[in-house]
Amino acid sequence: MGHLPVVHFGTFAQPNGGEYGRVGSAWLRWQLKSDQAARAMFVGPTCGLCGHPRWTVTSRNLA
């Protein structure tokens, strides 16, 4: 689960969906295309979102 402290509509009104658009498209690339670079954003103790200062991330059982 990832949380970014923004208003109700998130960042979708920003160009290319903003931060939520960036993360959402990475999730789809990982899940639908097996993109290993996109996978690194979500998996492991040093995942891309884990070190991001604005995101709060918790996960389990991601492979």
Image: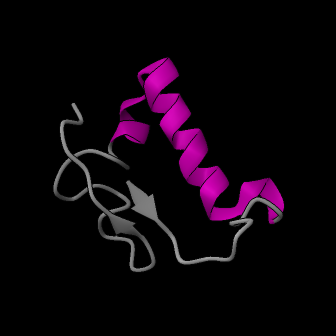
Left or right: residue 23 compared with residue 2: right
Q: Quadrant of residue 49?
A: bottom left
The x, y position of residue 39, in whole percent, is 36, 38
Q: Residue most toward the top?
A: 33
Residue 19 falls within the magenta-colored stretch: yes
Q: Residue at 66% of width from left, 52% of height from top?
A: 21
**x, y percentage for residue 10?**
68, 66
Question: Viewer-proximal residue, 30 or 12?
Answer: 12
Residue lying at 37% horizontally and 49% vertically, measured from the top left: 41
What span is in magenta? 14-39
Residue 29 at what x, y percent from top left?
52, 30
2 and 43: which is toward the camera: 2
Residue at image coords 25%, 50%: 59
27, above or below 34, in the image? below
Query: Relative to residue 19, is residue 11 drawn left or right?
Result: right
Quarter where residue 7 is shown: bottom right
Q: Position of residue 25 (x, y in %)?
A: 60, 41
Residue 5: say if magenta.
no
Quadrant location, the C terminus: top left
Looking at the image, which residue sits at the far front?
8
User: Residue at image x 42%, y 71%?
Assistant: 55
Q: Is residue 32 above or below residue 16?
A: above
What is the count of numbered marks?
Answer: 0
Majority secondary structure of the magenta segment?
helix
Indicate how the structure is coloured in the image.
Answer: one colour
Vertical position of residue 23 compared to residue 54: above or below: above
